[in-house]
Amino acid sequence: MKRPSSGDKPLVLTQGDPAGVGILTTLNAWPVLRESRHLALYLRGDTKVFQDTARRFSCKTPIVEIGHPDEACVAFRDGLPIIPSGETLDITPGKADPRSAAGIITSIKQAVGDVWDGHASAVVTNPISKNLLYAAGFKFPGHTEFLAHLAGELTNGPAPLPIMMLVGGGLKVALATIHIPLMTVAAHLTQDLLHEVCEITVDALKHDFGVETPVLGVCGLNPHAGEAGTIGSEDEDVIVPVIEQFKARGLSVVGPRPGDTIFHESLNGAYDGVVAMYHDQGLIPVKTLDIWGGVNVTLGLPFVRTSPDHGTGYDAAAQGKVRCESLISAIKLAKSMAQNRSKQT
Ligand SMILES: NC(=O)c1ccc[n+]([C@@H]2O[C@H](COP(=O)([O-])OP(=O)(O)OC[C@H]3O[C@@H](n4cnc5c(N)ncnc54)[C@H](O)[C@@H]3O)[C@@H](O)[C@H]2O)c1
Ligand SMILES: N[C@H](C(=O)O)[C@H](O)COP(=O)(O)O
């Protein structure tokens, strides 16, 4: 699958939910980032929403409408560059508006198209409200699966398996399963799935994070990683055989390790990354350690994508009291990953 290799191009941000925190966090991130060397970005979205929000909360960030991504590097020094994505709405911060669903999706599609066409080096997505999009007929659990679908369309092939990874607090944690009910996790955990998740994660640690010989820790599913098969069978029947396959290839994959100690071990340098078996098993440690600096990364795509680790935060958006550290971390990580990836091609 072709990988765009345009590490020196600007980053493209999606607008996200126009009533969510993404608007003001993006406006507040600009003065922090504008002096960063070798970094430029632009956004695909509704200029009016950014102008209205800046005015409402007395934000001084200038907004610079541009017509093409190639204008972003110069424009970024003077303000937040925005390419209008076509939808214009009167939005009240914190008040979700179902009419915004189309524009949210359009912005994501345009941003992915820019990266695929080589005009941008990575996509950074602002938060969306899943239930608002579901109500509008959105058929995907979230960005992660939608971006994989778009990648399949772009490559005229099957959608790649997207892996959600949370980076923060000194941890890199990839998930074997994502937005599925907890009671169905065991049924979803097959050797084939876990093998592909580990393969993609090892590849990303090498090519996106620049780890030459990564060590991957794999979390058990059951307490005490199944206690040698006496507390559930998945650890022995599914996880152990997969790890044995990687070891047979000379790759450093360790486990299954108990979920209550693997993150401590990783923080102490035992692993460059961890694979957790389900959403909260992996996200709780990262968000507990670093809720404001954590970054959501999608692995397995033919382009780099990061996102803040928080959601639309409607209550914070309504008050205009938002924190932009997670967005800034997502932007900086996207830049670093795109540069590492472009060195590989
Ligand atoms: N990256 C994403 O797109 C993403 C991530 C998580 C959740 N979501 C979606 O967002 C919606 C709301 O989810 P939620 O309420 O569970 O989580 P949330 O992160 O939106 O909010 C949790 C709490 O954190 C606060 N908060 C969030 N971001 C903030 C910021 N930048 N500054 C200050 N305070 C902030 C919120 O106001 C709220 O009190 C849901 O539809 C969910 O699916 C999206
Ligand atoms: N679980 C994700 C997080 O906490 O960041 C969130 O739902 C975002 O998912 P998508 O990136 O697939 O929208």
Image: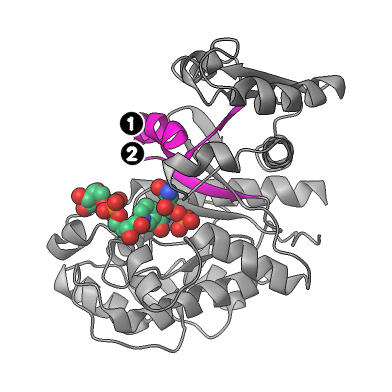
Which color scheme does this rendered protein use?
one colour
Q: Is residue 342 above or below residue 54?
A: above
Marks 2 and 1 close (CB-CB < 8 Å): yes
* 71 left or right of 46 in image: right
- Distance of mark 2 from mark 1, alpha carbons? 6 Å
Q: Residue 155: within the magenta? A: no
Is label 2 in a helix, a strand or a loop? Answer: loop
Name the residue: 51% across, 64% down.
41
Above or below — where is 323 with respect to 55?
above
Mark 2: give few (<14), some (14-19) or many (20+) Cα within 10 Å: some
Quadrant of the rendered structure where residue 215 is? top right
Q: Nearer the viewer, residue 296 or 37?
A: 296
Q: Is residue 176 visible?
A: no
Q: Is residue 324 above or below residue 245?
A: below
Foreground residue among 242 and 164: 242
Residue 43 appearing in the image: yes
The type of residue carrying mark 2 is Ile
Tell me: 120 left or right of 182: right
> What is the quadrant of residue 16 in the picture?
bottom left
Residue 298 vertical placement versus 142 (above, below): above
| Neighbours of disc 1 within 10 Å: few (<14), some (14-19), many (20+) | few
Q: Amino acid at mark 1?
A: Thr
Q: Nearer the viewer, residue 132 or 28?
A: 132
Q: Which residues are magenta?
A: 273-299
Horizontally, residue 172 falls left or right of residue 322, namely right
Q: Is residue 282 magenta?
A: yes
Q: Is disc 2's CB within 8 Å of ligand 1?
A: yes
The residue that appears at 44% across and 40% down in the rendered structure is 183
> Residue 288 got which mark?
1
> Where residue 326 sits in the image (x, y, percent)?
38, 47
Residue in the picture at 46% in, 18% down:
223
- Residue that numbered label 2 is attached to: 291
